[in-house]
Image (cartoon, helix red, strand yellow):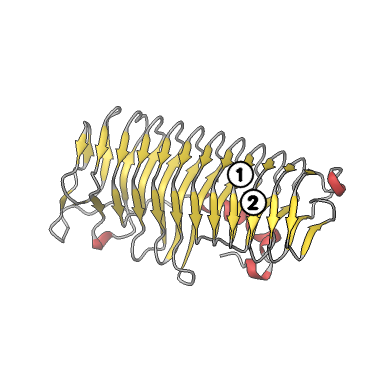
Amino acid sequence: MVNLRNGAWARAGIIAIVGLALVFAANPGAIRAGSGGGGSSLCPATVGKDTALRSDCIGSIQVTASGVTLDCAGHAVNQTSFDAGVGDGITLGAGIHDVVVKNCVVNGFYRDFYLTSAHSNTLAGNTANGPSYSNSFYGFVLEASASNTLASNTANAAPFGVSYDFVLDGSASNTLRGNTANGGPLYTSSSHGFILSGSEANTLSRNTASGTSTGFALGGSQSNTLSVNTATRNDIGIVLGGSSSNTLAYNDVESGIVGYVLEGSASNTLTSNFAAYNTGDGFSFVGSTWNNVVGNTAQQNGGVGFRDTTTGTGTSNTGSYYWGNYCVGNPTPSVPTGLC
């Protein structure tokens, strides 16, 4: 975890954070067939037609046909205790489209839900739970996948190791709406809520990240829209690293360490966002130019309301345009002065 409490994030940590999921480790293995316990049956290895689960089951499921529905009806898809933290739970592979996966509780895989080169699918009302013991865990992963919808899903980080709850890697035009990313225990795990790497034109709205190292992180990502999202009790609420032309509007970051961070990011628009009760800065800009920062509020943060260390030709020589921002109850309203 980046040591934000000692201020080390400002230069060294942000790009590393947003690059974190961005190099996927190879899948450490597939399920070993035939093992199980707890009275659960084996899951169907493949789904090629409309399928509804009638009980909890053990093993991976791969959707092999387009236009079908997998309804788990609240039942669990479990990895075996022998293979905790390896394999993929539910997979939609190359060319699969117009599939609905709903009401599934997936437990204990390396990647619980994995879409690769899949498009126009819907994942709704599902839950991804990290394994009890694992070095790394991915809840929902979209890799080179476009025009998918993730709605009202929940990812719960593993209690140990590093967890990435929702990841978009090289994926475009997806919609994430009403999802929840929950972090793991503070001293035994490092978790990240919503991660976009090399991804563009995605829409994230009304999602919640709590108790993570980074709530929402964009790395090398363009033209995405984040609106009406909530981040609470995170080290960093929302961070952009090397990302441009994104829109952040009406987001709420509270009770963490740092609210919003932009590093090496240009031509983004931040409007009507709220940062409050964070122990550090409300809004922080490092090496970021030509951003429009309009009508945002920094309230009762422990550091600076708005901090911009970039030099340029914008408001107060920061290289960005600031207008109509509000600072309430911060020890220092802005650095330089005049940003709020």
Q: Residue drawn at (44%, 68%), measured in percent from left and top?
A: 185
SS label for mark 2: strand
- State the residue in front, 194 or 118: 194
Q: Determine which residue is flagged by label 1.
A: 250
Name the spot of residue 261 as percent of width and height, x first. Answer: 67, 53
Instruction: Tell whether 305 sits left or right of 179.
Output: right
SS label for mark 1: loop
Relative to 283, say whether 82 is above or below: below
The reply to whether callout 2 and callout 1 are in contact (CB within 8 Å) is yes
Q: Few, some or many C-alpha atoms within 10 Å of disc 1 (few <14, some 14-19, many ≥20)?
A: some
Name the spot of residue 40 as percent of width and height, x first. Answer: 15, 55
Q: Residue drawn at (67%, 64%), measured in percent from left and top?
A: 280
Residue 330 visible in image: yes
Q: Residue drawn at (29%, 50%), measured in percent from left and top?
A: 105
Q: Amino acid at mark 2?
A: Phe
Q: Amino acid at mark 1?
A: Tyr
Residue 23 visible in image: no
Q: Residue drawn at (30%, 60%), measured in percent from left and top?
A: 84
Name the spot of residue 171 as percent of width and height, x first. Answer: 50, 37
Quadrant (top left/top right/bottom left/bottom right) for the N terminus: bottom right
Name the spot of residue 337 as percent of width and height, x first. Answer: 85, 55
Q: Determine which residue is flagged by label 2.
A: 274
